[in-house]
Amino acid sequence: MLSEAVREKIRSFFGRYETKRAALLPALQIAQNTLGHVSLQAMVEVAELLDLQPSEVYDTASFYTHFWTKPKGRKTIVCCRSTSCVLLNADAVLQAFKDTLGIDEHQTTPDGEYSLMTEECLAGCDHAPCVLINERLHQRVKPEDVPGLLADANNDKLDIPRSTLFDPPQPGTTPPASPAGEAGNAAGG
Ligand code: FES
């Protein structure tokens, strides 16, 4: 169940758009960041918040590979499957992750540590092949790099400040208020 703080964080996005419906992707992102995945119960609650049918939320959540409808690992490995990376051996890199972890795409290791998936271009084409671990981008990855990459406990740690825009609220904090004039949009959207 989504906490009131999480609901408020989702509502804080309403003023950015002309309709509540348009806040669906941020709402799903916040739900996933909070729960680790977007459960069916979360979809029902997001639908209520955004005045949508649960089936509409499910359609969107299940369309994007980014959203997981079942629990995923603490770290998500995303291998790029687009042209620049594939031309530079991305298929072998993906296979190395599968072999080392013993899982296939969209599966999670039994210890709950890693989930594996592929996505289109990760926006690092000039350093292909690219792999994302949570929010950290690894560039020019070779199949033989994979065991060492997995052994690095900091393989998902960013070395730059990150945005907290979509993070769920932390206990004891209040989501930022909507900018002036946005309350009307929220009420009427
Ligand atoms: S094609 Fe792989 S990062 Fe763009």
Image: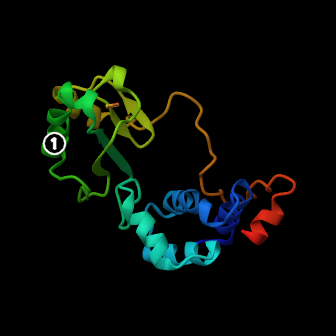
Q: Residue at x 70, y 65 (%)?
A: 8
Question: Where the C terminus falls, by quadrant?
Answer: bottom right
In the image, residue 178 sits, relative to residue 155, either above or below, namely below
Could you say where residue 162 lies in the image, as x and y percent from the top left? 58, 37
Evaluate whether residue 68 shows in this view: no
In the image, residue 56 sits, relative to residue 141, either above or below, namely below
Question: How many numbered markers are drawn?
Answer: 1
In the image, residue 92 sits, relative to residue 20, either above or below, namely above
Evaluate whether residue 128 shows in this view: yes
Q: Residue at x 26, y 56 (%)?
A: 106
Amino acid type of the residue tagged 1 in the rendering? Thr
Q: Which residue is mark 1?
A: 100
Q: Is residue 144 left or right of residue 121?
A: left
Could you say where residue 184 lies in the image, as x and y percent from the top left? 83, 65
Q: Residues within 10 Å of mark 1 (few under 14, many from 20)?
A: few
Q: Residue at x 59, y 52 (%)?
A: 167
Quadrant in which residue 173 is drawn: bottom right
Say what secondary structure mark 1 lies in.
helix
Q: Residue at x 76, y 71 (%)?
A: 188
Q: Residue furthest front?
A: 18
